Image (cartoon, coloured by chain):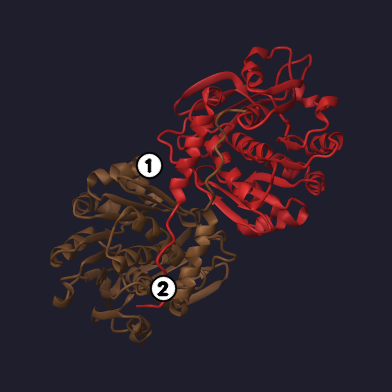
Chain colours: A red, B brown
Amino acid sequence: MSLLVVGSVALDTIETPFGRVSDTLGGSATFFSAAASFFCPVQLVGVVGHDFPVAELEFLQRRGVDLAGVERASGESFRWSGVYNYDLNSRETLETRLGVFAAFQPRIPEAFRDARWLFLGNIDPVLQLDVLQQVRAPELVACDTMNYWIEGRRDELIRLLEHVNVLMVNDAEARELSGEFNLLHAARWIQALGPEIVVVKKGEHGAILFTPEVIFFAPGYPLEEIFDPTGAGDAFAGGFVGYLARNGAVSSEHLRRAVVYGSALGSFAVERFGVRRLMDLTAEEIDDRVMHFRELTAFDQPVAIRPVP
Amino acid sequence: MSLLVVGSVALDTIETPFGRVSDTLGGSATFFSAAASFFCPVQLVGVVGHDFPVAELEFLQRRGVDLAGVERASGESFRWSGVYNYDLNSRETLETRLGVFAAFQPRIPEAFRDARWLFLGNIDPVLQLDVLQQVRAPELVACDTMNYWIEGRRDELIRLLEHVNVLMVNDAEARELSGEFNLLHAARWIQALGPEIVVVKKGEHGAILFTPEVIFFAPGYPLEEIFDPTGAGDAFAGGFVGYLARNGAVSSEHLRRAVVYGSALGSFAVERFGVRRLMDLTAEEIDDRVMHFRELTAFDQPVAIRPVP
């Protein structure tokens, strides 16, 4: 049930209304692995520069993440810096320094090429397709993308999606990709390109799963404080794909629960700066939060109101 | 289990990307009554002008709405006119002509003063308080308000809320009233003023119930087409309070189901222009949609992930 993730490993400088951190551990593959490692063994493929504090990745290794695919290249590490506005719903990118990520050509180690579960983090669709060709017979391929690729690599992205089972994007990305404002229509449009499963992440408003048979909705978890939204989407993806990989099945019932586990991991990710909350998180806390999610939406079979009194 | 509603009865001119209607039946008390009448007898108090097409209210009467409290005044009826933008998430008010509504002094007919359930639609908090004083011993008082009163009648609104059990507002209103961006904090702030139950309506993003014991979340129903959002909040309120009144109880379980019935009524209201969909709606359709809501969020007890593999 090994789960392979390819994506960025970065150093983030983040400012929120609650404070500021510099060069903190970040990147899509980092958040994804930190979350997915609660569910199954993870194999990480990415690149870091000569200046990367590799010791900070040790917590992943202790949790069963195989870092043999993390290439160390000469040059600077990928750095991102951004400021969130007061309501944490929008952010401004101050600087993106690609460093060694600019020339990243993912090479999947031989030992990883039999991975059954694959997550293509948000990188150039050309590279995502290249990774896909190096993995022999994945049972499930999930991927993320962003507005930058939707605009700049549209044709390549659409070619990639033919080979993808699960597309996980936020609501703005689903709308931009499909040209449909209504999310139901957007999901159906994306499904017609290939991915039978579409997960639309809506931040504080929750997430929606669309399959040919099911529409399922998980709310945003009502947190006392949202500290730093960075990485919430990747933590969600790690919980979602990790749950499926752990159970080795993709039935409707597994998919529903995977959305809730994903939502739980996303809700923890935002409680502290960067990846910190995912470092000290426990499986018990995750299970407890999933039960809280259940309480949030469960209701008894109602008494029917027909016939009209 | 009689339910009394006081609010506006209006003629709306609405433009959406799907078309335009002129002088169509609208108003908070109209939408509320149309929805609540599926659950219990409703008593409506409001005012219309000499030019009002009273025959259009007959469908309410046939559904058990007592119109004895609808005063006919000399002067023009209340008219509202607005245009929705392409995504239906925001609207511009083109014109508000208060007409006879400007001098509205709700007089509750003697036969209505024993109402057990009371909904104070979105009118001046001074009038809402006045209505409250005319009703002898209501078991539950629910009310709505809007930014106009939050800004212009803040002190009066806060005095009113001391006597209110359920405040039903949208997310922007909850935030403006409380000065808290986080909806959990906003709800706790409002609860401290009096209403032990706060329902925050978030349009396409669903609705959240806050009680001292429970937080419950219902999603927005994934509709193929949202035709006209006018009145959705009042239809929600009608389904919510109507369900409670029908069952004569306000336990946590009843409140959860009331939110779902409210969401169902709100989702129907937007399927056609104005109040039209609520005119031909049936109790069977409502029950079916409630079961669909259940499918949207239900998931099996998950297999716990502890201990970490």
Using the image, name the chain to which the residue with label 1 belongs: B
Whole-percent x and y of residue B147? 34, 53
Quadrant in which the N terminus of chain A appears: top right
Residue B227: where, in percent of width, then height? Answer: 54, 68
In the drawing, does residue A252 fall left or right of residue B83? right
Indicate the chain on which mark 2 is placed: B
Could you tell me residue B245's position as x and y percent?
Answer: 29, 66
Residue underneath mark 2: B12
> Does residue A134 show up?
yes
Q: Nearer the viewer, residue A88 or B75?
A: A88
Dot 2: few (<14), some (14–19), or many (≥20) neighbours within 10 Å?
Answer: many
Q: Is residue B152 left or right of residue B175?
A: left
In the displayed structure, A245 sits above or below A212; it is: above
Q: Assess disc 1: are there few (<14), some (14-19) or many (≥20) residues with their C-alpha within 10 Å of its C-alpha.
A: some
Of residues A210 and A144, the one nearer the viewer is: A210
Residue position marked by numbered label 1 in the rendering: B184
